[in-house]
Image (spheres, grey):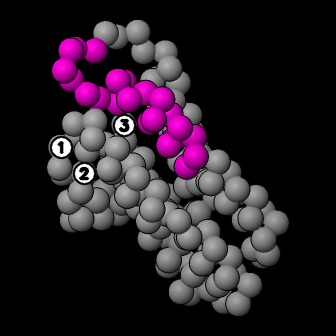
């Protein structure tokens, strides 16, 4: 589940950088720059927690991350739609974590064992994406 979020954030980061660089006016240039702030840290946070939970080190592989992000961008070329998709996925994962009744094995550390940390992290990221939607709506996109 955390790999999906990391891939979505990587795709969003690349899409924002692209839009930042090719903006037709300075207001949008600054808007996309503002929206991109902090995403690298969010990606890092997701991947660090995933590794702590026992995910494969593949989650840290740059080639795999960029390839997965490229696949996301084939489906989502609109920033607003991608932001909404990320929020939806995060809410689904939080619900899954909160409703999972599965017993975890002793000595196994995974996202269910670290449920509160994962939920807090995902909630923070969803809040940022919601603020992004506000900026997209009222921040001067024409």
State left or right for residue 18 relative to residue 51.
right
Is disc 1 in contact with disc 2, using a CB cutoff of under 8 Å? yes
Is disc 3 in contact with disc 1, using a CB cutoff of under 8 Å? no
Q: Nearer the viewer, residue 117 or 43?
A: 117
Badge 1, how many Cα within 10 Å: few under 14, some, many 20+?
few
Badge 3, how many Cα within 10 Å: few under 14, some, many 20+?
few
Is disc 3 in contact with disc 2, using a CB cutoff of under 8 Å? no
Q: Which mark is residue 109?
A: none
Q: Residue furthest front?
A: 107
The residue drawn where x is 45% and y is 62% is: 41
Span highlighted in magenta in the image: 104-125
Is 121 in the magenta?
yes
Q: Label 1 to label 2, Cα distance in Å?
A: 6 Å
Q: Earlier in the sequence, mark 3 or mark 1?
A: 3
State left or right for residue 31 relative to residue 2.
right
Q: Label 3 to label 2, Cα distance in Å?
A: 11 Å
What residue did someone put label 1 on? Answer: 56
* Element type at mark 2: helix
What residue did someone put label 3 on? Answer: 1
């Amino acid at each position: 589940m955390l790999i999906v979020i990391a891939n979505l954030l990587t795709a969003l980061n690349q899409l924002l950088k692209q839009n930042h660089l090719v903006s037709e006016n300075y207001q949008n240039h600054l808007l996309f720059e503002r929206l991109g702030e902090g995403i690298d840290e969010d990606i890092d946070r997701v991947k660090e927690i995933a590794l702590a939970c026992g995910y494969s080190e593949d989650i840290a592989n740059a080639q795999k991350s960029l390839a997965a992000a490229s696949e996301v961008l084939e489906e989502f070329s609109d920033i607003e739609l991608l932001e909404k998709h990320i929020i939806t996925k995060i809410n689904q994962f939080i619900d899954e974590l909160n409703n999972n009744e599965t017993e975890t094995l002793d000595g196994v550390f995974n996202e269910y064992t670290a449920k509160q940390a994962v939920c807090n992290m995902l909630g923070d990221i969803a809040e940022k994406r919601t603020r992004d939607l506000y900026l997209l709506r009222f921040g001067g996109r024409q």
